[in-house]
Image: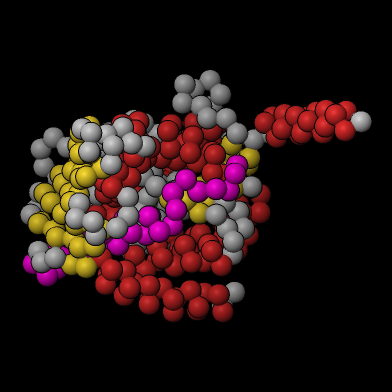
Amino acid sequence: MRFGGAVCLVAAITVRGSEAAEKPLRVGMIGLDTSHCHAFAEAFNDEKSPQHVPGCRVTHAYPKGSPDIESSVSRVPEYTEKMRGMGVVIVEDIGLLVGAVDAVLLETNDGRPHLEQVLPVLRAGKPVFIDKPVAGSLIDAITIYRLAEHHKTPVFSSSSLRFGKGTLAVRDGAIGQVTGCDTFSPCSLEPTHPDLFWYGIHGCEALFTVMGTGCTTVVRTHTGDFDQVTGTWGDGRIGTFRGIRRGKGGYGGVAFGTTGSQPVGAFDGYRPLAVEIAKFLQTRQPPVNAAETIEIYAFMEAADESKRQGGVPVSVGEVLSKAEREATRKVATLIDSK
């Protein structure tokens, strides 16, 4: 009898699993001002695409993103029409979008409105992927994660470079223990954001994917065309990021370990990230913890502070503590204003 009951239970689970597999999660997209919108919608919606990732489907989109960054604003009409062409319902209210879907992708290219845009999602308890940058300031980044914890809503943010094959191999021990790493990426600047938040995040994300947390001080050398940011970790390791604005850019780097060295930081397309997003939305388990993401943004904010002070070493801990104090006040205000 017990065996028969187990068979029935397995059969029931199998049927429910099949039904779940046949009915993908309904995903809403906030902000249609970046090429990532079309890339993710194609990955989730187009079953004939070689980039297809099953389990999710973008069903609704709220198009408005940045109010004042021309490179973003100008894209909205084109990307809105592309979404309509893929059968996505366009809505003019984030609340309506949140009510119609199971999960959300926050794609607005401008990090400044992310906190305001993500609040209804967090309050509804629906898992949300926040595309880079997670926010327009370190204070807002911390605030978002603290509100997510308060509302018990899973949040995940990452650059696609985190999930490059070579980068993950090093993180998983391909060269033994990592003793250091140097990465590079394009690093265009946007006056409305801390310098590295806008595009340097890609190379910085790859750096932290390999090095992990524990950076204590940051020194930045800045010219009009280049940035060199050197981080010292608490265990004596050194990691660097080179931001490129002139000449051939690209994405890459090299990691050093106890058993060898290996290239890292390559861009392997959007599908690896889309796979992780789908897993996250389905399981509600973020593949990157909040502490690591916040430290990346603290590293970049410390780099800005080093630049402001003429290239002196800046404590990541002090930058983080200052931002946390401000975030505490902001979180309290937002919770009380609900």
The residue located at (85%, 29%) in the rendering is 3
Rendered location of residue 163, percent (x, y): 38, 37
The quarter of the displayed image where residue 185 is located: top left
In the image, residue 54 lies in the stretch drawn in magenta: no
Q: Is residue 221 left or right of residue 62?
A: left
- The residue at the far right in this view is 1
Q: Taking 119 as reference, is 102 above or below it? A: above
Left or right of residue 168, residue 252 in this image: left
Circle count: 0
Q: Which residues are magenta?
A: 282-310
Q: Nearer the viewer, residue 214 or 329?
A: 214
Q: Position of residue 251 (x, y in %)?
A: 23, 36
If the image is split into quadrants, where does the C terminus sit?
Answer: bottom right
Q: Residue at x 22, y 39 (%)?
A: 257
Percent from the top left, x then y, of residue 42?
49, 31
Q: Check residue 300 for magenta coloring.
A: yes
